[in-house]
Image (cartoon, helix red, strand yellow):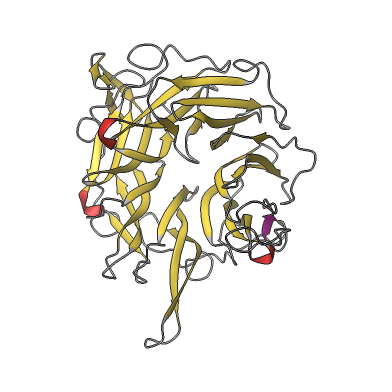
Amino acid sequence: MRRNGIVVGAVVALLAGTAWAAGGPGDVDTDFGTAGQVTLGGASSTADAQVWAVEEQGDGKLVLVGHAASTSASSGYEWRVARLQAGGALDTSFGTGGFVSLFGESGTGTDAATSAYIDGDGGIWVAGAAAVASGSRKKKTYKAGARVLRLDASGALDTSFGSGGSADLGAMVQALALVPDGSGSVFVVGRGPVATAGSGKGKNGGGSSSQGLVVACLDENGALDTSYGSSGFAQVDVVTSSDEDKPLIHGAALQSDGSLVVVVRIWTADTTVIRLTPAGVRDASFAEATISEPVQDVAVDEDDRIYVACVPTLDEVEIRRFDADGDVDASYGVSGIALVINNGVQTAPLPGTALRIDAAGSLTVAMMETMAGGTFNVFAVRLLDSGARDASYGPLGDGESDRLEAMTARDAYLQADGGLIVGGAASGGWAVGRLAGD
């Protein structure tokens, strides 16, 4: 096993979920793919194509969504969905040879699938942004916007979902996260036009052209739940007169009563932790935290406590914990803050997908570090409920995993056994890696 290129441990075998995993908790699972990683060169021939989301089916197969070079235009990207067997082999029974291609005919760089969710019937929800054609063949135009589709278990478009397989997301321009409510409905968290008090100093000129947080609520069939927010949409103005008009949505998580906690950052300002009520209204009773340092993700535990991943400096990551109503939980770490890592290497949690909580209440923080020469490694740290590192995790017994080397990551999926699947990119195309569980 290696940490920053140094051999630090040995390999043992244990049973993990649906496949044998080589290594102890936090070691690279060398029985997954080749030496713990899978590269899907068939996903794309372009260096910047990548996996954006990873989900696990009930049978242990892994569904990957992201973007890759368009197969229907000479340039630009398309949505791509792939499925792997539990051990990392491509499942060629899915789609065409293991892949499904969607959109991409516009030839632009706007088309990318960025989130996924597998429902109780095995339907695969995929969300992102894409440019869709309208008009005649000679005068065809493309309009970019947020899209949500559903595939069946074979990879075919489920035309019973929404309208012909696609849900109506109104004027939402980007769908960034799918958050199931546990009863069949799904929140689509994204960005779009909102009525705002902006004074015209932002990129889009402020006023009604500004963008804000937009959340749509879809029922299990892809129809808007018009009882949520205003006709199915919750809209939150997060722009001030001196801020730019495109907020960054860096994570969303659901509390047990159906309230949605979202972290929103303005380019030139602080990050705000916002809560929407189950009815889709900004919750005035919630103690909205304003955090001056960059925030990468948010998670909620079974007690509705809120965890926020922050990056105070380029080589430091910390977790802040708040109680269910947004007040600082001073019992966590030191005065509500747990230091995750500070090792002199530029490190950041995965944006919007870094925090995963297991059944025991331990928090896994997935991160990416920048190495000399511009290469990247992916690793994780596991924290106990107190905020201290979990000594049962990692090859050195210090709560820190081994490294998945020479890959980037955009998503991390925590399996039932504590194994961590990460998806991103490597020099050969899409990349997926696994850190062993307990």
Number of labelled discs?
0
Q: Which residues are magenta?
A: 232-236
Please tell me which residue is depicted at 40% across the width and 16% down the height of the picture.
Answer: 393
Q: In the visual, does 145 lie left or right of 367?
A: right
Quarter holding the N terminus is: top left
What percent of the width, then of the height, locates residue 42?
21, 53
Please tell me which residue is depicted at 68% across the width and 56% down the height of the picture.
Answer: 235
What percent of the width, then of the height, locates residue 422?
36, 37
**Is residue 232 placed above or below 47 in the rendered structure?**
below
Q: In the visual, does 190 lie left or right of 351?
A: right
Q: In the visual, does 126 lie left or right of 402?
A: right
Q: In the visual, does 31 lie left or right of 202?
A: left
What percent of the width, then of the height, locates residue 363?
51, 25
Residue 85 visible: no
Please tell me which residue is depicted at 50% across the width and 32% down the height of the picture.
Answer: 355
Quarter holding the C terminus is: top left
Please tell me which residue is depicted at 73% across the width and 58% down the height of the picture.
Answer: 197
What percent of the width, then of the height, locates residue 66?
37, 52
- Res 7 → quadrant: top left
Secondary structure mostly seen in the magenta stretch: strand
Residue 68 visible: yes
Which of the pair 257/322 is nearer the observer? 322
**Is residue 105 placed above or below 26 in the rendered structure?**
below
**Is residue 55 placed above or below 435 in the rendered structure?**
below
Residue 405 within the magenta-colored segment of the rendering: no
Residue that sits furthest to the right in the current view: 285
